[in-house]
Structures are given as structure tokens and as C-alpha cells.
Amino acid sequence: MNKQEVLNAIYDLIAQNPVDMVTRDKLTALVDHVDTGQNAITFRDVRGKEFELKLIETYAPSEAVAKEA
């Protein structure tokens, strides 16, 4: 799987879209480690290239929140 396929599969999982078991198995096979301290999942492909999916907690600017209220 290339990075775009991985990101699309992760999005489908988060959005609770159907993901076939072959895709799910390929995705989980790429997980190298999970760093709960950094809120990150590191993936490593068969060539040893790594990339990371990281949760970054941010907040909407107060004026954006005020417009929605």
C-alpha cells in the first residue's frame, strides 16, 4: 500500500465506512509502533520507509465558534 491508500483506508475506518478485510490486514501489517505519549501511529513499508499519522489537538478560533452559535 502506498501512503495515499493508507490514508484513505484510515479515513474510511475513522468515518466508519466499510473496509474489506484485505485492506484492513494490509493496513495493520504496516503499523510499526504506536506512541501514546506523542499521539502518533508510525507506519513502515516493506522498503523501510516510515511515515506517521499524528493526532494534533487544536481549537477553533473563538470567532469561528461564535459564528456557529
Image (spheres, helix red, strand yellow):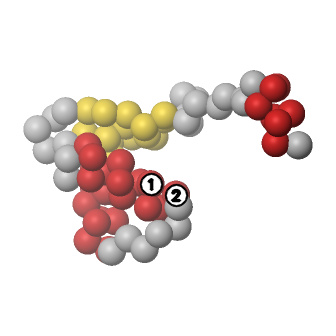
At a point 16% along the width and 35% down the height, the residue shown is 48
Quarter of the picture containing the C terminus is: top right
On the rendered structure, is 68 left or right of 1?
right
Q: Amino acid at mark 2?
A: Ile
Q: Nearer the viewer, residue 35 or 59?
A: 59
On the rendered structure, is 36 left or right of 61?
left
Q: Which residue is mark 2?
A: 14
Q: Nearer the viewer, residue 43 or 66?
A: 66
At a point 52% along the width and 57% down the height, the residue shown is 14
Question: Which picture quadrant has residue 66?
Answer: top right
Q: Indicate the secondary structure of the residue bearing disc 1.
A: helix
- Image position of 61 with respect to 22: above or below: above
Visible residue check, residue 35: no
At a point 34% along the width and 65% down the height, the residue shown is 24
Q: Indicate the secondary structure of the residue bearing disc 2.
A: helix
* Residue 33 placement (x, y as % from top left): 39, 40
* Residue 45 placement (x, y as % from top left): 19, 43
Q: Amino acid at mark 1?
A: Tyr
Q: Nearer the viewer, residue 16 or 48?
A: 16
Question: Which picture quadrant has residue 41?
Answer: top left
At a point 33% along the width and 74% down the height, the residue shown is 20
Visible residue check, residue 51: yes
Q: Which residue is mark 1?
A: 11
Q: How far apart in space, not on screen, are marks 2 and 1 (Cα)?
A: 5 Å
The 10 Å Cα crowd at callout 1, few under 14, some 14 to 19, many 20 or more, is: few
